[in-house]
Image: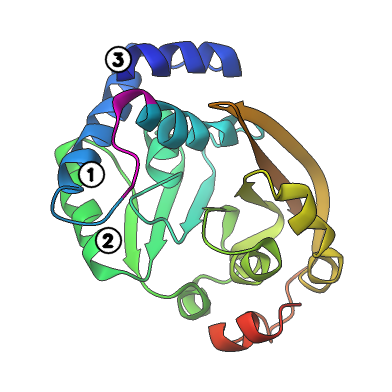
Amino acid sequence: MMEKTLREGLTALGLSLPEARQEKLCAFARAMVKQNEVMNLTAITEDTQVAKLHLLDSLTVLCCTDLKNKTLIDVGCGAGFPGVPLAIACPEAKVTLLDSLGKRVKWLEETLPQLGIEAECVTARAEEAVAQRRESYDYATSRAVARLNILLELTAPYVKVGGAVLAMKGAQAAEELSECAGAIKKLGLQLEEVREFPVDGASHAVIVLRKIAPTPKQYPRRYAKIKQSPL
């Protein structure tokens, strides 16, 4: 059922993936569901829902940009979404998975090589890891981590000028975007487009923010400060 839902969903998105990559996507999703029995990775475990809400939702990023031979960091990757499906679908991309929870990252480090998936796994807080990785990625993406005015301060510093933040959001996308005019400007970003995708009857959006100037060195601030007074 997962394979069928994935195949139909790819067609609906206008994406085409070789059979082997589709199989690998399902293999990773099943490994996550199995691990979920002993570790809290997802509330979504039913085959068709996993295909729609994890795999296809992650792959909407590919409708917005070409990742071939590009670098991408998934900030706050959790169980590996959207970073792992993107690494599977576009093996020519160089994907970094960043999360502050060591247990999750360790599981990814062990599981990905077994499935033949290449990605760099990093355990660190987003606002700390940026010290060594500032402005070194073509793209930063993130899903279900924080409201956009907080998220942009955590992701923008990773992106090179000319690259983009690809923020994945749900039904609140427009409302969150309206809070962000100040943050977008201060961080060196410019809104390029908002692409909406119906995922399982709900609206999901990828907000594409182009990096047009370097992010000032004072950002990101400490997380407590970001949360207390978002830009």
| Tag 2–tag 1 contact (CB < 8 Å) | no
Q: How far apart, in angstroms, are the residues tagged by discs 3 and 1?
A: 23 Å
Of residue 29 and residue 94, the one placed in the foreground of this image is 29
Between label 2 and label 1, give the one nearer the viewer.
2
Magenta-colored segment: predominant secondary structure: loop
5 vs 179, left or right, is left
227 vs 212, left or right, is left
Label 1 secondary element? helix
- The kind of residue tagged 3 is Met
Counting residues from the N terminus, which is met first, the one under dot 2 or under dot 1? 2
Q: Residues within 10 Å of mark 2 (few under 14, many from 20)?
A: many
Q: Is residue 129 magenta?
A: no
* Circle on res. 105: 2
- The kind of residue tagged 2 is Val
Residue 153's image quarter? bottom right
Pinpoint residue 94: horizontal percent, then vertical percent: 44, 46
Residue 225's image quarter? bottom right
Of residue 148 and residue 85, the one placed in the foreground of this image is 148
Q: Residue at x 76, y 40 (%)?
A: 194
Q: Is residue 46 magenta?
A: yes
Q: Look at the image and give the residue range highlighted in magenta.
A: 42-48
Residue that badge 1 annotates: 112
Is 149 situated above or below 62? below
Pinpoint residue 52: horizontal percent, then vertical percent: 45, 28
Residue that badge 3 annotates: 1
